[in-house]
Amino acid sequence: MRLFRTLHFLSVDVVLGACLFQCLLTNIFLQGQFPPLLVILALAFTVWVIYLVDRLLDNQKPVLNSPIHDFHRRNALSIKCLIVCNIIILTTIVINLPKYLIINGVIIAFLVLAYWALLFYGYFDRIKFSKEISTAFIYAMGIFLHVYLNERETPYLLLILMSFLFFLLALQNLILFTLLANSGLKGDFILKGIEGVFVCLWLAILFFSHLSVFMLLPFLITFVIHLWIHYISKSKQWAWLGEIAFFSPLFYYLYAIIST
């Protein structure tokens, strides 16, 4: 249990969820393919670095107090070393990627640097949920990057709608736990709006595209788990479950194995 808690505090569950969704989307849109191992590793270490640095910058604000922030404060030196090691590994991976992926990855890297600058100087504090929106946008871009650069047959509109669907899923997670961690922060109506738009978009994609319900099921499972946390448990102690909810592509692969 302690090991699992440590891995959660280090955002390892976020990394695994991102890789699983990247594999799912590649499998759906690129005719049953999986991303090359280097592409998966590049995403994994990129997401890990971003989340670790994000926590590091968050801890510059003394008002933040939670078990995960306390963990990062106690182990600040070790986590900084982990970030450096991850950056070194990520660099060796990136230089071996195809040039077109490197170029587009650099564009996302500049967005991440701009995001960190805004976070460090406190600009996100001026507009409610601007940090969550920015994080969800960058997260969705990174996961869809390989599909966008290699898909040639799927209608472009469907890719955009699927990207927005995943963006809403990530945003639901981020805003939900921001609200649970800050009881005085008002914004539940925004979260309910995100949930309503997600349901409408999920149904529209299901009925008006070639994607089957089993391809879209992981999105729905993740969404429903967050609904349960929002309306039933109403506790930030379930943050770990909110991250594990992104392991839902495993149900798609389980169905694929059973059906064959």
Image (cartoon, rainbow, N blue to C red):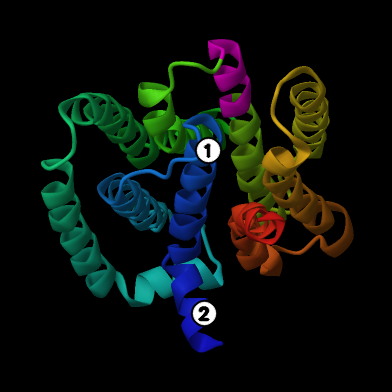
Q: Give the number of the disc on residue 40.
A: none
Instruction: Out of 224 and 209, give the one closest to the viewer.
Output: 209
Q: Secondary structure at mark 1?
A: helix
Q: Which residue is mark 2?
A: 4
| SS at mark 2 in the image | helix
Residue at the image position 50 percent from the left and 70 percent from the top? 8
Is 218 within the magenta? no
Q: Is residue 36 left or right of residue 69?
A: left
- Of residue 45 and residue 203, the one placed in the foreground of this image is 203
Residue at x 59% of width, y 32% of height: 167
Crowding at mark 2 (Cα within 10 Å: few <14, some 14-19, many 20+)? few
Q: Is residue 70 left or right of residue 102?
A: right
Whole-percent x, y for residue 108 in the image:
31, 29
Q: Which residues are magenta?
A: 155-163
**1 or 2: tag closer to the N-terminus:** 2
One can see residue 197 in this view: yes
User: Mark 1 = which residue?
Assistant: 25
Place of residue 126 in the rendered image (x, y in percent of width and height, measured from the top left):
52, 29
The residue type indicated by label 1 comes to Leu
Secondary structure that dominates the magenta span: helix
Vertical comparison of 240 with 154: above or below: below
Count of number-bearing discs: 2
Q: Position of residue 32 (x, y in %)?
A: 50, 40
Which of discs 1 and 2 lies nearer the camera? The answer is 1
Q: Amino acid at mark 2?
A: Phe
